[in-house]
Image (tube, rainbow, N blue to C red):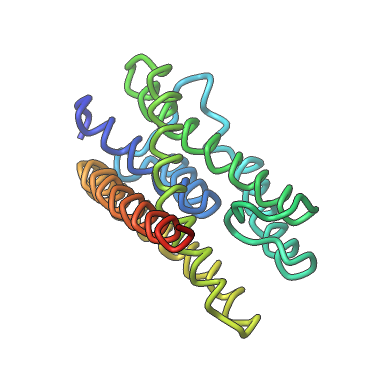
Amino acid sequence: MHGIVFDIGLGAGLAAACGMRPFLPLLLAGALASGGALSVSFAHEGFEFLRETWWLLAVAAALAASYALQLVFGVAPVVERGAPRSRGTRSASALAGIAYGSGALLFAGTLAAHRDAWWPGIIGGLAAAYLADRVVGPIIRGARARLTDRAAREALTVYLDAAALAAAALVCLLHPLGYVLVALLAWLYVRVRARADDKYAGLRILRR
């Protein structure tokens, strides 16, 4: 599993998983790289920190902090589009930034580990994470809007973490599944955009 096709599949899949929710994919990839398992590696000098113990502990602490922010300040796991600026929306925006940056790092680190040019991984990782965020965001926002029970709303983050971890694990087990994941997200993105366009078209008709 050391061909460039497999490396791109792994990097793109991990980046997309980070776009859903970054912490558990980061932990999984770092742990596998630390143990040299499933051809996941960050052996390049510039990306070795992704498998270091201190980094994994920092990611675990960030995961715990994100849950604390959500419970204490009501921070949503995704950015609430159109919501007024507040501590919660700023924190959610910061989490989105972490997701994009994590995706870029994992994609670039995967390419660099196998002596490929790493910089395309930055671009590809940002794109894959952005795509996943644009697909998952509306789904989570819609679910949170429909749920009246706070416990049920907060549980969505647990499901989102589980989905991100499952996606990352499958891609690590079989690297070409990264292409399948990105293709599926692209298809869902088109569907989400089409549904949004239909909704806005209906609103325009009602206003006439």
In the rendered image, the vertical position of residue 75 relative to residue 33, given as above or below: below
Q: Nearer the viewer, residue 147 or 40?
A: 147
Q: Nearer the viewer, residue 101 or 85?
A: 85
The spot of residue 194 in percent (x, y) is 31, 52
The residue sitting at the front extreme is 208
User: Which residue does the image show at 45% across and 60% down from the upper left?
Assistant: 203
In the rendered image, the vertical position of residue 30 relative to residue 160, given as above or below: above
User: Which residue does the image show at 55% across and 34% down from the upper left?
Assistant: 101
Query: Splitting the image into 4 quarters, where does residue 127 fall?
Result: top left
In what quadrant of the picture does the C terminus appear? bottom left
Query: Splitting the image into 4 quarters, where does residue 35 fall?
Result: top left
The spot of residue 68 in percent (x, y) is 74, 64
In the rendered image, the vertical position of residue 106 relative to residue 154, given as above or below: above
The spot of residue 39 in percent (x, y) is 30, 38
Query: Splitting the image into 4 quarters, where does residue 155 fall?
Result: bottom right
Q: How many marks?
A: 0
- Whether residue 169 sits left or right of residue 150 in the image: it is left
The spot of residue 129 in percent (x, y) is 44, 40
- Whether residue 12 sits left or right of residue 150 in the image: it is left
In the rendered image, the vertical position of residue 57 relative to residue 140, given as above or below: above
In what quadrant of the picture does the N terminus appear? top left
